[in-house]
Amino acid sequence: MKSTNLHDQYKFKSLQKVSFLICLFTLCIVFLSLDIMTGPSNLSFLTILNGLISPESLSTTDKIILWDIRLPDALIAIIIGCALGLAGIETQTGLNNPLASPFTLGISSAAVLGASCAIVFASVFTNNIPFLPAPILVPAVSLVFALIASLLIISCTAFQSGSKNTIILFGVAIMFLCNALTSLLQYVASAEAVQQIVFWTIGNLTKAGWSEVIIVSIIFLITLPFSLRNIWIMTLLRSGENQASSTGLNIERYRLFMILRVSVLTAFSVCFVGTIGFIGLVGPHIARLILGEDHRFLLPGACLCSAVILSFASLLSKTLIPGILIPVGIITSFIGVPILIALIFMRGQRL
């Protein structure tokens, strides 16, 4: 009788978690729809719906607004939210550090340094790399710098046998080094270049188009199955490294491939839209608070929570000040800080 009761409780809790995931998915759809509908051009709901079903029914101007501006911006918010959420939950679990996030490893700072170099030395890049078109110069160089930082972290992970403390310290060192070099570039650059660097650093979803949406989606869909294969390993790691090692788990090998997945997700996310803070940190914590440590639910929950937050931030960036588009990186910081503080008080302990 007792085992039956426990089984019923387990089924009930699992049903609750599935219901929460469904609610998160529904919120993603709702915020995605509102994001598409929001903008200075007054497109009605029926016009947008007809335009999505039958694009040829729209005028040329409305078609450009819907398909080339609003839809890519709204979709990239969902996709990058999912990517950063996945990277965040993997980082926090794999390194067993609640303050770990994709940006803790310094990959984002390396991307900013690459973008800054591309902006300041644009003529040097275009003259020496003729096959690199000017429109993709900044994201391309940003991606290269982010991947170089990723390779350094992966090399450190392999050399230090996957020590979590070493990985975090090395990532923080890369972050401070890249930030210092970026500040140096800003110091010697022209006022126009500094303005471009600051604007890129803040984070802005309007930089992305359909090609960026497709690329980040492909990277996320390629990475996700490998993360799902490790859900039991991630759940086991939360019980402690000693217990996980006693089962025969090769923690060093797991961390090496975890860093690889996180690095690729972060690099391809930030190189297109700039630095968007708190998403990869707060989203996984919200999901963990509600869903617990079972990564069968926690992993998709972290992706969906992060997507909801970023999509909501994208919506707020267009509506807070009428006629002005606030960079979404500013909004995510304003949202992330109170959420993080609330989580600390709700848990009654340090995260």
Image (cartoon, grey):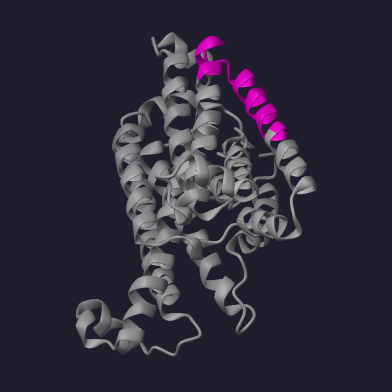
Q: 54 left or right of 20?
A: left
Res. 291 visible in picture: no
Image-quadrant location for residue 265: top left
Q: Nearer the viewer, residue 204 or 288?
A: 204
Q: 94 left or right of 21?
A: right
Residue 305 magenta: no
Quarter of the image with the C terminus in it: top right
Quarter of the image with the N terminus in it: top left
Image-quadrant location for residue 56: bottom left
Q: Nearer the viewer, residue 23 or 207?
A: 207
Q: Residue furthest right?
A: 187
The stretch in magenta equals 155-177
Residue drawn at (80%, 47%) of the image: 187
**Chief secondary structure of the magenta span?**
helix
Residue 165 magenta: yes
Image-quadrant location for residue 350: top right
Q: 126 left or right of 231?
A: right
Residue 93 appears at what percent x and percent y?
A: 51, 31
Residue drawn at (36%, 44%) of the image: 220
